[in-house]
Amino acid sequence: MPLRPSRSAYPLSWRVLDALEAGARGVWPARFARGVPWLMLAPAILLVGLLAVSLFEIADASLRTLDTATFLPSEEHTLANYARAFSEPVVLAVGLRSLGGALLVTLATLILAFPYAYAMVRTPSAAWRKTLLIALFLPFFIGQVVRAYGWLILLGNQGLANEILGLAGLGPYRLLFNYWAVLFGLVQYMLPFAVLMLAPALSAIPEEVEAAAGSLGANWGRTLLHVVFPMAKPGFVGAGLVVLTLTLTDFAIPAILGGGGQDFIANAIYDQFFRTSDQGMGATLTVLLVLVGSTLVGLVFALFGAGTLSLRGRGP
Amino acid sequence: MPDTPFFLQLSRRRFLQGAAAAGSLGAASALGLRTAFAQEPEKPAEIIVRAWGGSWVEALKAGVSDPFTKATGIAVRHDLTEDNEIQPKVWAAVAQKRVPPIHVNWDTTTNATKSALRGVTEDLSDLPNLAHVTDLAKPVGLDGYPIVDTYGYVYVLAYRPEAFPDGPPTSWKAMLDPKFKGRIALYNDGIGFHFPAQVAGGGKLEDIPANMQPAWDFIAKVKEQEPLLGEDPDFTTWFQNGEIDLACTISTNAREAKKNGIDVAWVVPEEGAKFDTDGLWIPKGLPENELYWAKKYIDMAIGKESQQVWLDGLGLPGVVPGLTPPADLVGDPSYPTKPEDFEHLIRISSKIQVENEADWFGKFKAIMQG
């Protein structure tokens, strides 16, 4: 049988791919193959590089004080902003409030996220799983600010919560504009993040392991305590890290639900940049926040590993 | 950008010709623009004016922006970025020699003074309508006109009449009444409250800024009352939702809330109330033709016709003599028109405010966040 002419010997799509491969070889010859991983990393390196440059700029700005005669930063470098940050009680108060809030919110969120994630992963009903997933993702379609304003409506003096209390002859009570309202709003905001981080870790635990624990005499509580929790540790660590860092740097919820009197450190940074025009002091607080946040994350990594953030679903 | 006042060179003669022909300043502006059309710098498709939202921008639109568009054919886009947030953007643009993001900034005089001190504002001394304004338009402590102040306003004590069955409050000390615990509000940077607090705390205005301890002592007492701290829109929301009974806020916000059916009234207490000004300014770095039209915009804003409509909307006294107060504000202490009306109002120079604002802000925050 005679061979078909070469132009029609292969499908068009094959020939297109051949041409593309030839083109790619021209642009990136085979001898550059060892550079492929670096090429794939290039976007990430670019992004991290930009972040590093920005941080350097912020660090530089933090070493310059504001001249209120010209509203220009000083030419010379000084540690005066850092000295001020460590000597002003309000910075310490706001910093401790942020840190304490972040720890409390992380703890509360993990406690609430676990049963949700467990139910979502273990339910035998596909319909329930989908319902729980939809309920989990819905809040992502509503921004943080809108959700916070939603709480203003629900928890306000004339809101739904006080109306219900009023039916029982109670209140109205001031449910908003205090520390607990801020923490409540943050927990509600962080819950989906924590569930999303926990669910893969729980999925990775075979149901048979729990069944085996049961067959060896462990009740549900002991199984949870001695089998599920330890095996889900990477999920707790990953979820905890995400919630901790997001809460520590949150701006909108403390601003809206705190009534102006429950600032977190991000609010203090905003004030310095945008209210007093003191970019040096704002940059100083930013550097301190980055240092505290990084130290916390480093501590967790050192003590518990990177959890699901290591992308292996296991601890060290 | 050239240092020469090209606006003056390009348009003063045409403006004067137009004024002579029309016989009135407002008409002169419009006619001057028409007669000089062929020679005037190229018109941009739009100019961008930073403004506060809600009733503030609506009033500006009705009084200045719409008439400007009608007279020139140039659209006006209002950028509602907060004044504090646009400031670093403008400063960065000027420092990097980029075209700034706005043509005209509607700003507090204190904020604008910072920009003037930083050297990012254009000189507005050549605006024709400056010949017809009161001293209120001139920024105190600055050379020339890097800003043109356009009106004054008062930080009043706004209250819910239902909470005061025996009559309106007469003193800022009403905030210390235990029954109002958790039901009072201040601006979150304390603006408007420092100076009356100085008097209410037993101090003297002459001691500002050297000794403001009476103010801090009084504010510390107010802190015990667990005040809410917010921005302009928050006060309206809080009054509307029954969250507060008393607030230190600009009279415009209280008046707007009242217009919207919220039961709110206001007084200037016996200790006095802070009087301040807002203004308009142009950032450096605009193309010459856009600078020209931005100046035209500000010139129109201090014309009598524009002031009347704009400030009727805001309920504030302007910088042009002979404006008619809105009917609901005739005789209102928050709408001062005569020298004696200012006796109970506290006015501290922008220079002192700018120099000390960061310290005052820090002290206020230390008390409120402590």
Image (cartoon, rainbow, N blue to C red):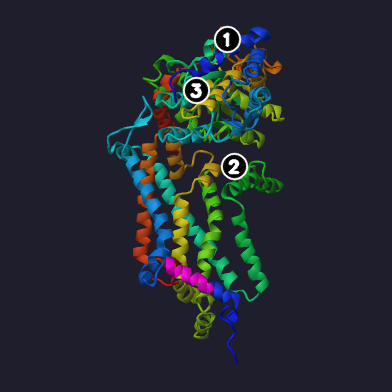
Which element is circle 1 on? helix
Q: Which chain letter matches label 3?
A: B
Residue B339 at x, y percent in the picture: 56, 7
Q: Are marks 3 and 2 in contact (CB under 8 Å)?
A: no
Quarter of the picture containing the C terminus of chain B is: top left
Badge 3 and badge 2 in a common chain:
no
Residue A33 visible in the displayed image: yes
Q: Nearer the viewer, residue A236 or B291?
A: B291
Of circles 1 and 2, the one toward us is 1
Question: Hey, what amino acid is under mark 2?
Answer: Arg
Residue B65 at x, y percent in the picture: 64, 26
Question: Hey, what amino acid is under mark 1?
Answer: His
Q: Which residue is mark 1?
A: B132
Q: Which residue is mark 2?
A: A174
On residue B109, the disc is: 3
Residue B272 visible in the displayed image: no
Residue A111 at x, y percent in the picture: 51, 62
Question: Hey, what amino acid is under mark 3?
Answer: Thr
In this image, B205 relative to A154: left or right? Answer: left
Magenta-tinted stretch: A17-26
Q: Specify whether residue A303 is painted magenta.
A: no
Q: What is the C-alpha distance between the residues marked 1 and 2?
A: 52 Å
Badge 1 and badge 2 in a common chain:
no
Quarter of the picture containing the N terminus of chain B is: top left
Mark 2 closeness class: few <14, some 14–19, many ≥20 residues within 10 Å? some
Which element is circle 3 on? helix
In this image, A295 relative to B10: left or right? Answer: left
Q: Which chain letter matches label 1?
A: B
Q: Nearer the viewer, residue A99 or A242?
A: A242
Mark 3 closeness class: few <14, some 14–19, many ≥20 residues within 10 Å? many
Q: Please give the count of numbered marks on the rendered protein.
A: 3
Q: What is the C-alpha distance between the residues marked 3 and 2?
A: 36 Å
